[in-house]
Every structure is written in structure tokens, then in C-alpha cells.
Amino acid sequence: GESVGLHLPTLSVQEGDNSIINCAYSNSASDYFIWYKQESGKGPQFIIDIRSNMDKRQGQRVTVLLNKTVKHLSLQIAATQPGDSAVYFCAENGNRDDKIIFGKGTRLHILP
Amino acid sequence: DAGITQSPRHKVTETGTPVTLRCHQTENHRYMYWYRQDPGHGLRLIHYSYGVKDTDKGEVSDGYSVSRSKTEDFLLTLESATSSQTSVYFCAISDGGDTGELFFGEGSRLTVL
């Protein structure tokens, strides 16, 4: 529920503006990256993924960018809506041994 | 929604007691995972399974054991619960291992007094 959001970095965005959530990963062996969205009281839900042979992938209102040189991943949300308010996690497959490892998350707060 | 059921959804127990959390899936997915979620730590992998009777440790496996005797069920056991194991526990399933989408359950909130 709400308690898992404590101590998280928070991004506040005006409704209608674009949001950019950033994530740094550490394992250069990772070749699969995913963004998840977690609403209060629920389990995380898949948003979009990208493989390391790509730099960019687009979905509906979302774009993921991958910069392997600096090990950086970002999620762009176009025309942010109140329903986008959630905690967003990036995840990677680290050592490619069937495990998916998550980052600590960023809370996205939508301003009216 | 993917067919994942966690039970119990809420549990309060005392230090030193055994606790078992159950994850049940109806998707026939090969991979099943247990994560814990705590403020400031995000989701941390406890144990996972890549098939019946095939399990392996995650990032924070100490104090936890798992069993998977059939495809649809993955049990997480705390042999002797401690207050540091107070957390929200999430089960997830996947058909693709480390390159597949994870589907999460609704979570089980465990409080150890």
C-alpha cells in the first residue's frame, strides 16, 4: 500500500505535461530491461520492455530509451494523466540466470 | 488479469512462529518468484523456481525456504519468523525466465510482532 512509497525519490509533474523517469543500472551483462508501474495497494504491472539491441521502443503514450554506454534507462510518459500517479520501477535481468532484479522505484505525483 | 492468487492476504504473527505463504497460478507458467517489498528497498527477490522441484536463491534468501511440488503452487516458508521479516510479499509468474514479462499477485502483508 502507501507505506511502500516512503523514502522514494518523487517526481512531481503537471497534468498534461510529459514525464521522464530515470534509472541507472549497474550490470553491463544485462540485456533485457523492463518498466513496471505499481499503484497503491496493488502488485506491479508491466508497462514496456526493451532488449539491449535496441535504443528506443515506443508503446501507447510511453517510450523507453536505453543508453548502454552510460548504463541508463528512462521512461517517458506523454501527456501525463491523473491515472499515471504511481510508483515506477525499472528492472533488469542482471546475470541472465532467470532472475529479474528491480530498482528502488520512483514515485510519480501528478499536479492538477 | 493473470490468474495468480496469494494467500493469506494479511497475516499477523509472533516472533518465532512458522509462517507459510502460498502462491497459486492457473496460467501454467514455468517460472515463479517470491519478492519482498519494503520502504526504501523496492522489490527484492527472495527465491524463485524454474520448474517443479527446481528452485534457486535470490538476493535475500536467508531465513526463507520454498517448495514447488506442482506447477501451479509455490510456497514460501519462514521457519521461525522475525520482526525483520515484516513486509509485503509478492508472488510473480513468467513464461520467459529472465526475458519474459512478470505477472504479479496482489501481495501478502505479513506483520511479525
Image (cartoon, coloured by chain):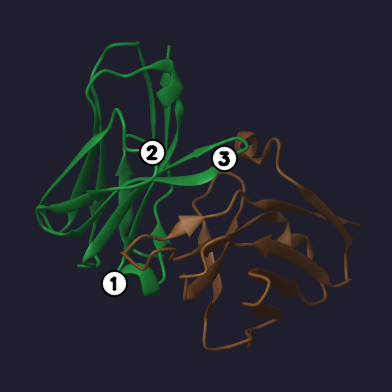
Chain colours: A brown, B green
- B49, B70: nearer the viewer: B49
Structural distance between the alpha carbons of marks 2 and 1: 23 Å
Front disc: 1 or 3? 3
Give me the residue at 31% from left, 31% from top.
B62
Q: Say which quadrant the N terminus of chain B sits in.
A: bottom left
Front disc: 2 or 1? 2
Output the chain of dot 2. B
Output the chain of dot 3. B
Amino acid type, mark 1 = Asp
Task: Identify the residue position indicated by label 2 in the image.
Answer: B60
Asked if marks 2 and 1 fall on the same chain, the answer is yes
- A87, A7: nearer the viewer: A7
Q: Position of residue B56 (x, y in %)?
A: 23, 50
Q: Image height check: is B39 above or below B106? A: above
Q: Are marks 1 and 3 in contact (CB under 8 Å)?
A: no
Left or right of residue B10: residue B38 = right
- B45, B70: nearer the viewer: B45
Q: Image height check: is B54 above or below B28? A: above
